[in-house]
Image (cartoon, helix red, strand yellow):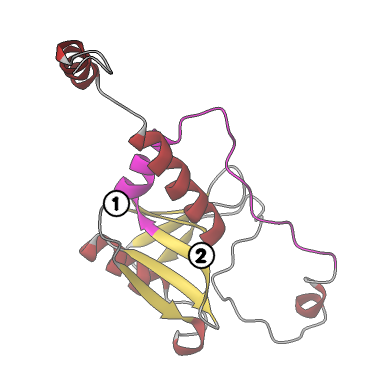
């Protein structure tokens, strides 16, 4: 099992609004995930594009990934009434809008309205997902990957088993 390295950004110590240019730059330069937390609870995760591609490769099963829970009716009222609202890195369904620029990075909201991709020079470098979805993807990918055997490996294992004496006949 690979070692998990993550850069944790606690919301109370991050800029307001979140400096996505700095965070995506960290992901791109280190190749490690950046976890946005609120009161030490993971809220969302920025993953390198290659890592999300690997996870999604192994999770190619007929199970849809669980979507983050929909906001309750009262959650948006504070913003509508002009109250203070912090962007804590929580992902919510966003309508189609113009991509946003963060320095050299362009932020795109994906078709499902939840996932967010960051590209630099037309190349995707990071993806921001809900922390629960990342946990689900990693768990599912781990189980699928552990049960996978390449055809060459399967043939070698079959040959090994054929050479073994029958059970009880030793």
Does residue 122 show up?
no
User: Residue at 42% across / 69% down in the picture?
Assistant: 35
Q: Where does label 1 land, which residue?
A: 121
Q: Is residue 49 left or right of residue 97?
A: left
Circle 2 residue: 44
Left or right of 130 in this view: 4: left
Find the distance from the CA under tag 2 to the CA under tag 1.
24 Å
Task: Give the residues drawn in magenta, as a range.
Answer: 47-73
Helix, strand or loop at mark 1: loop
Near-viewer residue (128 or 62)? 62
Q: In this rendering, is residue 133 above or below 62?
A: below
Comparing labels 2 and 1, the label whose residue is closer to the camera: 2
Give coordinates of residue 78: x percent, y percent: 79, 80
Q: Is residue 30 visible?
A: yes
Disc on the earlier residue, 2 or 1: 2
The residue lying toward the viewer, choosing from 50 and 159, is 159
């Amino acid at each position: 099992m690979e070692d998990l390295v993550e850069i944790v950004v606690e919301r109370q110590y991050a800029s307001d609004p979140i400096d996505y240019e700095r965070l995506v730059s960290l992901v791109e330069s280190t190749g490690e995930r950046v976890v946005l937390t609120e009161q030490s609870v993971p809220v969302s995760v920025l993953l390198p594009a290659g890592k999300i591609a690997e996870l999604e490769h192994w999770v190619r099963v007929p199970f849809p990934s669980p979507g983050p829970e929909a906001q309750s009716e009262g959650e948006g009222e504070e913003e509508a009434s002009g109250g203070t609202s912090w962007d804590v890195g929580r992902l919510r369904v966003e309508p189609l809008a113009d991509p946003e620029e963060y320095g050299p990075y362009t932020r795109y909201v994906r078709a499902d309205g939840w996932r967010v991709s960051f590209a630099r020079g037309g190349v995707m470098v990071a993806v921001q997902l809900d922390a629960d979805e990342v946990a689900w993807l990693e768990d599912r990918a781990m189980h699928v990957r552990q049960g996978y055997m390449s055809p060459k490996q399967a043939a070698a294992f079959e040959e090994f088993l054929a050479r073994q004496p029958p059970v009880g006949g030793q």
